[in-house]
């Protein structure tokens, strides 16, 4: 077996392990009682873990910011909590981006050079548009960021371009969501 083949197999096994761990934690976090228990027991570290797991929105369709009342009830700082949730979601998005990069490596061995050239040309032609759309999507749409992040990794966008857009989008989304929840609680 060649070194490239061993490397691909290792990456696939590692990716499967990450997905398995995400699904395991997702089953723990589905109930707000489980999230409350993690936060009470582990504080800010628990928030970060919950946000990473919820960042895999395909596994956990509930964003971690939805548990903000639980976090605030535990006496945690709202702005630091928003930052940790954003950081955890962004880490999950980076892992999703990595899955796209693995797919690119696997398929680049078997794809025609013409298809690879077409992908490269399209990426150069629309260089910043997908990054801008990723920011808007992450900031405003309550759907999995993986819809954009995995394909961007697959077509060869650099993490240095994807990371700021997804972090800023997640920060805007979480802040908007938190301000909406905070104002609801002020009414009562």
Image: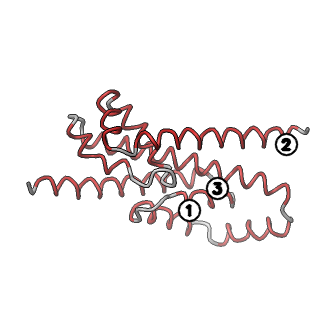
Element class at badge 1: helix
**Label annotation for residue 5:** 2
The quadrant of the rendering that contains the N terminus is top right
| Mark 1 and mark 3: Cα distance apart in space | 9 Å
Q: Which is nearer the eye, 176 or 14?
A: 14
Q: Earlier in the sequence, mark 1 or mark 3?
A: 1
Quarter of the image holding residue 161?
A: bottom right
Q: Is residue 13 left or right of residue 138?
A: right
User: Of discs 3 and 2, which sits in the foreground?
Assistant: 2
Q: Where is residue 131 shown, x and y percent of the image?
A: 54, 63
Q: Are marks 3 and 2 in contact (CB under 8 Å)?
A: no
Seen in the picture, residue 118 relative to 40 is either above or below; the reply is below
| Residue at 49%, 59% in the rendered image | 144
The disc, 3 or 2, on the residue closer to the chain's N-terminal end is 2
Count of numbered marks: 3
- Residue at 74% x, 65% y: name it: 120
The answer to whether residue 146 is left or right of residue 140 is right
Secondary element type, mark 2: helix
The percent position of residue 5, horizontal first and vertical second, equals 85, 42
Pointer 2 local density, CA inside 10 Å: few below 14, some 14–19, many at least 20: few
Give the mark nearer the N terminus: 2 vs 1.
2
Please state, as top left, top right, bottom left or bottom right, where the C terminus lies in the image: bottom left
- In this view, the residue in front, 21 or 147, is 21
| Residue bearing mark 1 | 148
Residue where numbered disc 3 is placed: 153
Alpha-carbon span between mark 2 and mark 1: 27 Å
**How is colour applied across the structure in the image?**
secondary structure
Q: Residue furthest left?
A: 188
């Amino acid at each position: 077996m060649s070194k490239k083949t061993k490397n691909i197999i290792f990456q696939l096994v590692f990716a499967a392990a990450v997905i398995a761990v995400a699904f395991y934690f997702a089953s723990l976090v589905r109930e707000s009682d489980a999230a409350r228990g993690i936060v009470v027991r582990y504080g800010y570290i628990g928030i970060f873990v919950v946000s990473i797991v919820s960042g895999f929105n395909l596994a956990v369709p509930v964003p971690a910011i939805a548990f903000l009342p639980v976090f605030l009830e535990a006496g945690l700082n709202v702005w630091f909590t928003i930052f940790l949730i954003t950081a955890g979601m962004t880490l999950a998005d980076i892992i999703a981006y990595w899955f796209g990069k693995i797919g690119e490596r696997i398929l680049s061995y078997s794809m025609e050079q013409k298809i690879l050239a077409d992908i490269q040309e399209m990426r150069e032609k629309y260089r910043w548009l997908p990054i801008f759309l990723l920011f808007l999507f992450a900031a405003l749409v309550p759907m999995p960021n993986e819809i954009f992040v995995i394909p961007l990794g697959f077509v060869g966008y650099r993490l240095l371009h994807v990371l700021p857009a997804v972090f800023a989008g997640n920060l805007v989304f979480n802040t908007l969501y938190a301000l909406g929840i905070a104002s609801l609680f002020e009414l009562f």
